[in-house]
Amino acid sequence: MTKWLWRIVACLSMCLIGVLGSESIANAAEISQYDVDVSIAADGTMTSKENIHYHLDKKQKLLPHQIAVGDNGEIGSLSIGMKAKEAKDYFPFAQSPTKDLGTYTLEGQSNMYKLELFNQMEEGDYIGQYETQIQDAWINYGEWQVLDLSFLNAPLASSNDTIVFHFPEAVNQDAVKWHVPNSDAVSLNWKNDQELVVEVGNRPKNEGIQLQLVVPEEVLPNNHTKGSESEGNQIVQGIEDKQQAAQAEITRQQRIIKIASVLLFLAILGFIGFSLWKKKTTAQRLSHVDQTLLTQTNWTPAMIAHFLYHPSQWITTLLIMMNLVNEGHLALRFQTKGKQITDIYVQDQHAVTQTHAESLFMKALKIQHNLTGEDWVSMNEWQTNRKRDFRQLEQQLVKTTKRTIRKQHVYDSVNKGLTLVWLLLIVLSLGVLVISIYWQMSAHFTLYWPVLLLIIGLIILWLSYQWLLPLKSEHGVAVAKNYRGQLNQLKDSQQITDQLRYSQDSGLTYLYSWLTGDNHAYAKAIETSPYTIDLAETMSPVQNLTLKQLRIKLK
């Protein structure tokens, strides 16, 4: 009993060692290129030349391989060679059970032969060449010649593999039938009337490509490996049924893609049409426009920018800083090199701020001041050394500014529903687009216009977010018209002069000129007038730049 127990343990140990050994080989080696060239003689004999490019991550003494011969086939001859990638000649291997270096073993199991190559291989790139003559794999069923054989049988995974079949006679391509299970990664194309190219995408390890190929009888006129005509007709009928089912699935997928893309595009157009109609009716119901001066409102420049335009996070921060300078809470000093801003130095003037966004900035500035100990805080060092914290600050400033705008009741209540519909259309369009591309790549068909329609729809949705949403309420339209009217006045030199002469806060008006890009003209008007504006003096080193150009060249 003890003897039998030890035998069982020994067998299990050997199996475990074999499994772990094969896994070790699989993990240490990979295939970078796998090409097979198959020449077919008139009698159906095939000469298969496999060229496999290996990459070894560590020293190896063993490489596994497999050769399929089919249910009726057998190996007529086999020659194996290997060389380092940079070497000129292949080193030939000899079959031997000794497992010495330079030998290989060959074991037949049903329709597959397993090989093991033994050699001393260092880490690096190698090319293995397996030339096999396979007999009786093609079966002559009278009207048809049929091949049912597995290719690309190396136990290691590979991708972008190629098999080229060379037929002895010209082939009527319309009469050829083929089938590959799970053929998503397989495509067949005729190079000419005698060469068929099979391309394979990703191939998992330990899986070959089981190919059923049917050609007319006259292609292999000397093939004497016979099969019954009824069996051949059954095979051909089975392949045709599979092809029809595959074509029916492709037709179904094409129909779904076409219908879904058209319906989604119409839904997007309906969404845009409703939004435009809602915007128009809101504007038509507007009875009057509030003409209150800008300086008599509680709207900050950052709020106006977000309400009328789409400023970046950095521009939002800049507008808040400039407004703090205008209010006397902050001091700025620009360091420039030519037209390039190399740094902006900020100093806290220790005054009480009015808005939540400004308070957030001043608190963050105080933290940065305490960390550096410098009286003038360098924005360059702040953005460089505490990049994550500064980005979070910018995000908080934008979020707070937008929240303050929403509290002014300037947006239509329908926006919540429109936003949900907008998100739903985005998700559905992206989903259908991804599925469409995946199906087309898998089944090897092409539908351009549905994909183009979906992309156009997504662009329309993106533009609607930039220029249409969120919809403004009647009050919001009045506020927008009021501010746009006031800002447009800054484009008139006489209006600028009047603003300097009569405005209670010409510094704030100067700040607004940066929103419209008229800051340079406003600064020129200040130079020729008896009035002085502290903010304009602060911004004088960069008055020739636009708001978008006020970027620091970070270290």
Image (cartoon, grey):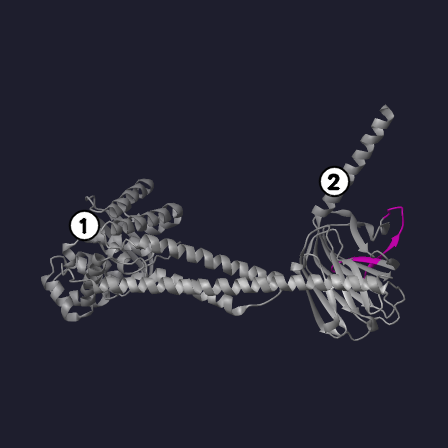
Dot placed on the residue nearer the N-terminal end, 1 or 2? 2
- The residue most toward the left is 502
Q: Which mark is residue 310?
A: none
- Was residue 93 drawn as part of the magenta stretch in this picture? yes
Q: Where does residue 244 sit, x and y in percent of width and height?
A: 67, 64
Q: Amino acid at mark 2?
A: Leu
Q: Quadrant of residue 21?
A: top right
Judging depth in this view, the residue of 193 and 363 nearest the camera is 193
Judging depth in this view, the residue of 307 and 112 nearest the camera is 112
- Residues in magenta, as a range: 80-100
- The residue most toward the top is 2
Q: Where does residue 15 sit, x and y in percent of width and height?
A: 79, 38
The 10 Å Cα crowd at callout 1, few under 14, some 14 to 19, many 20 or more, is some
47 sits left or right of 242 in the view: right
Q: Quadrant of residue 153?
A: bottom right
Dividing the image into 4 quarters, which one contains the N terminus? top right
Residue position for label 2: 20
Residue position for label 1: 328
505 sits left or right of 206 in the view: left
Q: Residue at x 34, y 49 (%)?
A: 395
